[in-house]
Image (tube, rainbow, N blue to C red):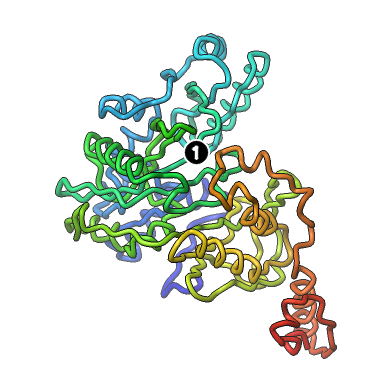
Amino acid sequence: MRAADAAYPIGAAAPRESYLNSARIIEVAKRSGCDAIHPGYGFLSENADFAQAVADAGLVFVGPPAKVQRLLGEKTAARRLARAADVPVAEGTEPLRDAAAARAAANEIGYPVLLKPAGGGGGKGMRVVGRDEDFEAAWRGATGEATAAFGAPALYLERQITNARHVEMQILADGHGNVVWLGERDCSIQRRHQKLIEESPGPNVTDGLRAKLGAAAVRIAERAGYVNAGTVEFLVDPTGQFNFLEVNTRLQVEHPVTEMVTGLDLVALQLRIAAGEPLPFTQEQIERRGAAIECRITAEDPFAGFVPASGRIALVREPAGPGIRVDSALFSGMTVPSEYDSLLAKVIAFGANREEAIARMRRALEEMRIAGIPTSLPFHRAALFEQDFVVGRYDTDFVTRWDPKKVSDLPDGAITAAALAAVLAMRSRGERRTVPVADPAWARAGREDALR
């Protein structure tokens, strides 16, 4: 917003008064004279009613049309469509009317099962149920969260695939019947069913599996009449067998991973497709090279179960250098609110191979400083050295097995960040004082003067 030529206030901090207020957003769009609305990757990005309202207002919605969003946004309908497209789907149910029916279905499928909201994704309202005696509490919790997040309490059951990897396939489809897949992203490292680290190519994804996932994603997209960018998500078991999970009818947070390995600008392609242009390449012309990893830096305390945090950021230092990209809106002195998602920044590292990408990401994470509130940086720094990650032997239980006791709650360099924050505060008061160098990394680089 600070970099825009013009900015329009859209309401109070509460999302329903601003970023979820479709009428107000369309009113601003008309007032500003814009041609199209790009919904980003949150809030109204997968809201079919909003997509239709944009079209009815004579504007272009940069994403799949409302009818496609309705078809794929209801998760059990998407499962039926995947089966019709000859794509494997995990055993599950249609939307369930009450806890008793759901419990009976769970006993028939066999524990563990997943309770999932029929009207939305992103991990909201999802519960893993491992025992019959835990079912009632899980049903109540999932129903309440699904209602709050999606406005509908409908839930369905799905058999949980243990030791699975979460692998998603990026697709693009134009309005002329062309659909392509760009490659997979492994998003298995998650907490609360929400992603923390993504990478491409996925470890242990063979060329054969990649081709099968791509073909399955294209079949689903073609059957749905898909247009614009999207992601088809799968769970892959230890044997390499995969099952359809869902379709995200929007741009994903982790789209930079695919951009790095393909050299394509997905947002520019979204705009071109929305303008009616055909895809400028065929499936055979898409080239993938190297490897990319993304770490989602969040305002959460990894030593307290990733509890979200808010407050004032005293200091930010973002990494740079070869193969490093940072997507963020951080600045020293900003206040992180409590009303929204905890995502603060995305750090993406690219390398000629996975080993180089990991090495570059380790350096970037060590360079990065965020002082003032707890962040997930200590987790990410530790995860990049975990042997299971280094050899690519991880699954969706990686975070539950991670032991924060192995990591100091004061990561290397945090003292320096605190010292820098103090220096900035003193300078704002016109004081001059020498602060001792506490971080060896600064001393090695000969940057003691930065602390004076």
Q: Is residue 409 above or below residue 8?
A: above
> Which percent across, then down, holds residue 73?
38, 35
- Residue, x 34% and y 44% (percent of image)? 210
Residue found at the very far left of the displayed protein: 176
Q: Is residue 95 above or below residue 274?
A: above
Q: Quadrant of the C terminus?
A: bottom right
- Residue, x 56% and y 14% (percent of image)? 99
The tally of labels here is 1
- Along the viewing direction, whichever of 356 and 11 lies nearer the viewer: 356
Q: Is residue 299 visible?
A: no
> Which percent across, then down, holds residue 100?
56, 10
- 405 sits left or right of 310 in the view: right
- Residue, x 31% and y 48% (percent of image)? 171
Q: Is residue 177 visible?
A: yes
- Along the viewing direction, whichever of 445 and 257 lies nearer the viewer: 445
Q: Amino acid at mark 1?
A: Arg
- 290 sits left or right of 363 in the view: left
- Residue, x 84% and y 88% (percent of image)? 434
Mark 1 lies on residue: 165
Q: Is residue 137 above or below residue 4?
A: above
Q: Secondary structure at mark 1?
A: strand
Crowding near pointer 1: few (<14 within 10 Å), some, many (20+)? Answer: many
> Which percent across, then down, holds residue 193?
56, 39
> Which percent across, then down, holds residue 368?
64, 69
* Residue 335, image quadrant: bottom right
- 271 sits left or right of 422 in the view: left
- Along the viewing direction, whichever of 38 and 344 lies nearer the viewer: 344
